[in-house]
Image (tube, helix red, strand yellow):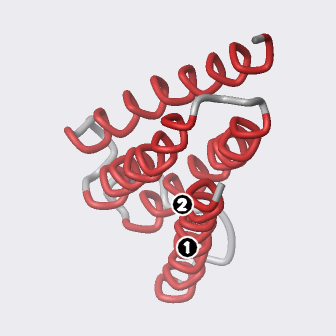
Amino acid sequence: MKIAIISVCFLALIQTLLGLAVSLCRRKYKVSCGCPDDPAHILFRVRTAFQNCAEWHPLFMALMLVLPMAGSAPWTIWLNPLVVGARCLLVAGLVTEPLHKPNNLRVMGAAFNYVLALAFAALVLFSSLS
C-alpha cells in the first residue's frame, strides 16, 4: 500500500507543480484568464498539461487506492509507478513541444495512459469478483 500512497503523492506533486507553472506563466505574460490561441505558446502547453492531469489523476488515484482493497494480486502494486512514469511522459510531451502536431513523448504517454487505465479498471473488477 505504501507504493500506492507514494504514487498518489507523485501524481499530486505533478498536478501542483503544473498549477504553479500556469500561475507563473500567467504572471510573466500578463494573462489573467484563458490563454493565447497559439499551441506553441508555453502558457497554452502548460495549461493543456494541467487540464489533462486534472482530468486523469483523480481516476488513477482512486484506482491505485482501490486496487489493493479489492484483493488484487501483490504484483499489481508495481503498476502504480508505471502510471506515474506514463503521466510524466505525457506531461513532458505536452510541455516541451508545440501542440500543433503529436510528438513521441506525448503519443507514448497517452498510449500508456489508456492501456494502464483499462488494465487498472479490469484488475479492480476482476479482483472484486473473485
Q: Residues within 10 Å of mark 2 (few under 14, many from 20)?
A: many
Above or below, comparing residue 8 to residue 17 in the picture: above
Split into 4 quadrants, where in the image is the C terminus? top right
Q: Amino acid at mark 1?
A: Val
What residue is shown with label 2?
47
Left or right: where does residue 63 sit relative to residue 118?
right
Left or right: where does residue 110 sit relative to residue 60?
left
Marks 1 and 2, how far apart at CA: 6 Å
Q: Earlier in the sequence, mark 1 or mark 2?
A: 1
Q: Amino acid at mark 2?
A: Arg
What residue is shown with label 1?
22
Residue 69 in percent (x, y) is at 79, 38
Which residue is at the front of the view, 118 or 73?
A: 73
Label 2 SS: helix
Residue 96 in percent (x, y) is at 27, 60
Residue located 26% across and 36% down the image = 101
Split into 4 quadrants, where in the image is the N terminus? bottom right
Return the mark for residue 98.
none
